[in-house]
């Protein structure tokens, strides 16, 4: 089945730890995105990548890092510099490089900082 | 002013009701518009794109009013399964902005 997978579904982290969230797609999509969703708020863009080995900061990139070494993979690292990391993290992809294409989302990872 | 703002929810309606959501946007250069549906603790999924001429998909009708800078979603004959949060998404140049969502709860 084609789609986007994210793992783990739930993640608990102690303060001061870095943690990496996985995102994989087998849709052969060019662009991939990371969003953060907080209760009662819309999705906010963290980072996006339109091609392999290239990525751009979104609106709230501070405290996060990404890599795009393969077309199908776009992992997100939440570093200890992120002041309030507890949130629902969503990865998405689009067929082309335009964000206005239909966004296909993964099931998300819920990160909780203890 | 927020770039995209939706009707605050929740909307609680009985089965069979007609319900409408509005979404305003601030950037008049916005080119594409969408409605996404998000079930509780799940990922958003595209419900429908919104075209200038308006479009309909079964019980769902989307409208765009460029002059007043808003889009709307009308749901007729609400079903229990329509209960979800509906996200308005707007595409100003170079960006994609998600609204905060409007929660709909359809009751028997």
Image (cartoon, coloured by chain):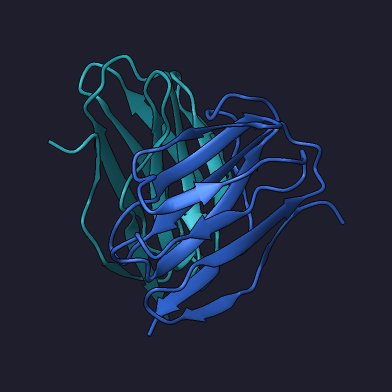
Chain colours: A blue, B cyan
Q: Nearer the viewer, residue B40 or A22?
A: A22
Q: Residue at x 57, y 24 (%)?
A: A98
Whether B30 is drawn above or below B7: the answer is above
Q: Nearer the viewer, residue A22 or B2?
A: A22
Please identify the residue farthest to the bottom as the structure is shown. A114
Evaluate whether residue A108 shows in this view.
Answer: no
Please identify the residue farthest to the right as the structure is shown. A1
Q: Is residue A26 left or right of residue B62?
A: right
- Expressed as whole percent of the image width and height from the top left, the position of residue A47 reads 49, 41
Whether B79 is drawn above or below B30: the answer is below
Whether A11 is drawn above or below B76: the answer is below
- Expressed as whole percent of the image width and height from the top left, the position of residue B92 reads 37, 22
Q: Quarter holding the C terminus of chain B?
A: bottom left
- Expressed as whole percent of the image width and height from the top left, the position of residue B47 reads 55, 46
Q: In the rendered image, which quarter is residue A69 located in?
A: top right
Q: Nearer the viewer, residue B104 or B36?
A: B36
Q: Quarter holding the N terminus of chain B?
A: top left
Q: Residue at x 58, y 52 (%)?
A: A91
Q: Residue at x 32, y 14 (%)?
A: B29
């Amino acid at each position: 089945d084609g789609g986007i997978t994210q793992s783990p579904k739930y993640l608990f982290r102690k303060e001061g730890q870095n943690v990496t969230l996985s995102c994989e797609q087998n849709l052969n999509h060019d662009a991939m995105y990371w969003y953060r969703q907080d209760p009662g708020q819309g999705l906010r863009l963290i980072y996006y990548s339109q091609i392999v080995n290239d990525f751009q900061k979104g609106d709230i990139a501070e405290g996060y890092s990404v890599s795009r070494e393969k077309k199908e993979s776009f992992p997100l690292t939440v570093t200890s510099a992120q002041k309030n990391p507890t949130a629902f993290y969503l990865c998405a992809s689009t067929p082309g490089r335009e964000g206005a294409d239909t966004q296909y989302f993964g099931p998300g990872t819920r990160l909780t900082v203890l | 002013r927020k770039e995209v703002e939706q009707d605050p929810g929740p909307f609680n309606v009985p089965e069979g009701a007609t319900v409408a959501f509005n979404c305003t946007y601030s950037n008049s250069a916005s080119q594409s518009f969408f409605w996404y549906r998000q079930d509780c603790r799940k990922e958003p999924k595209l419900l429908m794109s919104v075209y200038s001429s308006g479009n309909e998909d079964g019980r769902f009708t989307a409208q765009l009013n460029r002059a007043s800078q808003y889009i709307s979603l009308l749901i007729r004959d609400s079903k229990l399964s329509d209960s979800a949060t509906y996200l308005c998404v707007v595409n100003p140049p170079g960006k994609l902005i998600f609204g905060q969502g409007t929660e709909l709860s359809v009751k028997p």
